[in-house]
Image (spheres, rainbow, N blue to C red):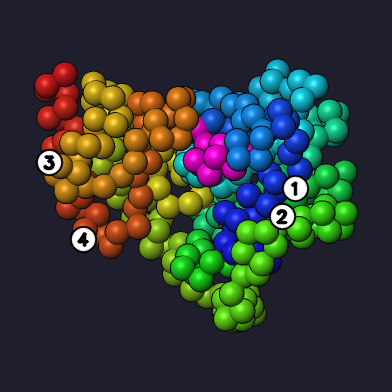
C-alpha cells in the first residue's frame, strides 16, 4: 500500500534506478513521471505518440530508443494526458520488446475502470511471460473518487516488493489507516455506481466532442479517463497563451500541452468533469475564445 498512486511512482524510481539509468515513457506524459525519474538520478527518454495513431505507444518506436542504459519501460493505460487506451495488440508488441531486451515494465493502471464504449482494458502484466518483470501501480482516486484519501498500491515480484520497503518507509511510512479501511470498503462494496458514472461521463464526453467538431478542433476520442487531449494548433497561438487567455478572458481553466513535454505543444488537456449545464456554457465560451484567437492570429 502507498500514500496514493503517485507515491508508488516515486518508490518505483527510487528502488530501481541507478544514476544514468534510462526510462522509456510515452510522450506526452504526466509530469510526475519525469520529475520522479530525475529525482532518482535517472533519465527520461521520450517515445513519441501521434494523434493519427490514437496515441498508441508502439513497440517499434520503443525499440529504436533502447540503449545499454535502458532499465525501465513505463506503460500508462488509459493514459494521462492523452486519454488513450492501449489495445491488446499494442501491449503484446510492447511485451515482446520488453522480453527481448530484458526490460522491467511499470504499468500504471489508475484509470482501468474509467473506460468507454467497447474498449477492453488489458494489463500488460497478465500477458505471457510478463508477470515476473511487471510492477503494477493503481489506486482509488479515479474509479472511487477518493483523491483526498491518499491511498494506492503496487504489486510486483517478491524480490522487488522487499527491496521497495525501505524507500517507501523513507517517504511516508504508511498510508493512513482510515484510508486503507475506506479502500477496502470501496473494493468489497457495491460496484453499480461505476455504470452510472460512466454513462454520465460518456454523455459529457460526447457533448465536448460535438463542440470540438463544430469548431474544427481535432482529437483522438478518449478511450479512458475524463478529459480530451485536443489539438488547438488551429487557433494560431501557443498553447500556454491559449490557456492564459481562457482563464483571464473567459473564466475557463484547462492545461497547456506544453506542460506534458515538448511534444505536447499545440494541444490542451481539458476535463469534462463539470456538470452538463456548466459544460455547455464552458464550451460556448471555448468557442468564442477559439474564434477570437483565430481572428487575431
Mark 2 to mark 3 CA distance (whole Å)? 45 Å
Image marks 2 and 1: residues in contact by CB distance under 8 Å: yes
Magenta-span inclusion, residue 130: no
Residue at 22 percent across and 37 percent down: it is 244
Position in image of residue 48 (x %, y %): 56, 25
Residue carrying label 4: 277
Q: Choose mark 3 or mark 4, whichever is in front.
A: 3
| Dot placed on the residue nearer the N-terminal end, 3 or 4 | 3
Please tell me whether mark 1 sits on a helix, a strand or a loop.
helix
Front residue of 141/36: it is 36
Image marks 4 and 1: residues in contact by CB distance under 8 Å: no
Q: Chief secondary structure of the magenta span?
A: helix
Please tell me whether mark 3 sits on a helix, a strand or a loop.
helix
Residue at 85 percent across and 33 percent down: it is 102
Magenta-span inclusion, residue 35: yes
Regarding residue 56, the answer to whether it shows in the image is no
Position in image of residue 222 (x %, y %): 46, 44
Position in image of residue 238 (x %, y %): 28, 25
Q: Please identify the quadrant where the N terminus is shown.
A: bottom right
Q: Choose mark 1 or mark 3, whichever is in front.
A: 1
Please tell me whether mark 4 sits on a helix, a strand or a loop.
helix
| Dot placed on the residue nearer the N-terminal end, 2 or 3 | 2
Please tell me whether mark 2 sits on a helix, a strand or a loop.
helix
Mark 1 to mark 3 CA distance (whole Å)? 45 Å
Residue carrying label 2: 167
Mark 3 to mark 4 CA distance (whole Å)? 20 Å
Front residue of 162/29: it is 162
Q: Is residue 273 left or right of residue 59?
A: left
Residue carrying label 3: 249
Amino acid at each position: 500500500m502507498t500514500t496514493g498512486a503517485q507515491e508508488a511512482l516515486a518508490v518505483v524510481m527510487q528502488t530501481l534506478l541507478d544514476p544514468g539509468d534510462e526510462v522509456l515513457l510515452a510522450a506526452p506524459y504526466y509530469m510526475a513521471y519525469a520529475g520522479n525519474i530525475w529525482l532518482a538520478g535517472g533519465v527520461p527518454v521520450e517515445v513519441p505518440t501521434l494523434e493519427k495513431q490514437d496515441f498508441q505507444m508502439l513497440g517499434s518506436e520503443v525499440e529504436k530508443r533502447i540503449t545499454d542504459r535502458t532499465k525501465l519501460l513505463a506503460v500508462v493505460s488509459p493514459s494521462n494526458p492523452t486519454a488513450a487506451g492501449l489495445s491488446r495488440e499494442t501491449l503484446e508488441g510492447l511485451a515482446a520488446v520488453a522480453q527481448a531486451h530484458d526490460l522491467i515494465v511499470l504499468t500504471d493502471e489508475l484509470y482501468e475502470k474509467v473506460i468507454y464504449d467497447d474498449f477492453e482494458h488489458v494489463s500488460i502484466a497478465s500477458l505471457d511471460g510478463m508477470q515476473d518483470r511487471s510492477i503494477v501501480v493503481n489506486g482509488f482516486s479515479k474509479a472511487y473518487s477518493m483523491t483526498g484519501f491518499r491511498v494506492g498500491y503496487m504489486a510486483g515480484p517478491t524480490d522487488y516488493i522487499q527491496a521497495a520497503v525501505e524507500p517507501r518507509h523513507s517517504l511516508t511510512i504508511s498510508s493512513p489507516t482510515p484510508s486503507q479501511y475506506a479502500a477496502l470498503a470501496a473494493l468489497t462494496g457495491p460496484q453499480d455506481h461505476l455504470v452510472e458514472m460512466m454513462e454520465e461521463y460518456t454523455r459529457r464526453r460526447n457533448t465536448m466532442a460535438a463542440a470540438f467538431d463544430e469548431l474544427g478542433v481535432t482529437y483522438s476520442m478518449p478511450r479512458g479517463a475524463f478529459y480530451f487531449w485536443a489539438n488547438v494548433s488551429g487557433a494560431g497561438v501557443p498553447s500556454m497563451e491559449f490557456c492564459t487567455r481562457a482563464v483571464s478572458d473567459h473564466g475557463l481553466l484547462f492545461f497547456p500541452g506544453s506542460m506534458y513535454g515538448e511534444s505536447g505543444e499545440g494541444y490542451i488537456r481539458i476535463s469534462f468533469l463539470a456538470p452538463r449545464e456548466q459544460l455547455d456554457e464552458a464550451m460556448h465560451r471555448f468557442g468564442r475564445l477559439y474564434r477570437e484567437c483565430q481572428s487575431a492570429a
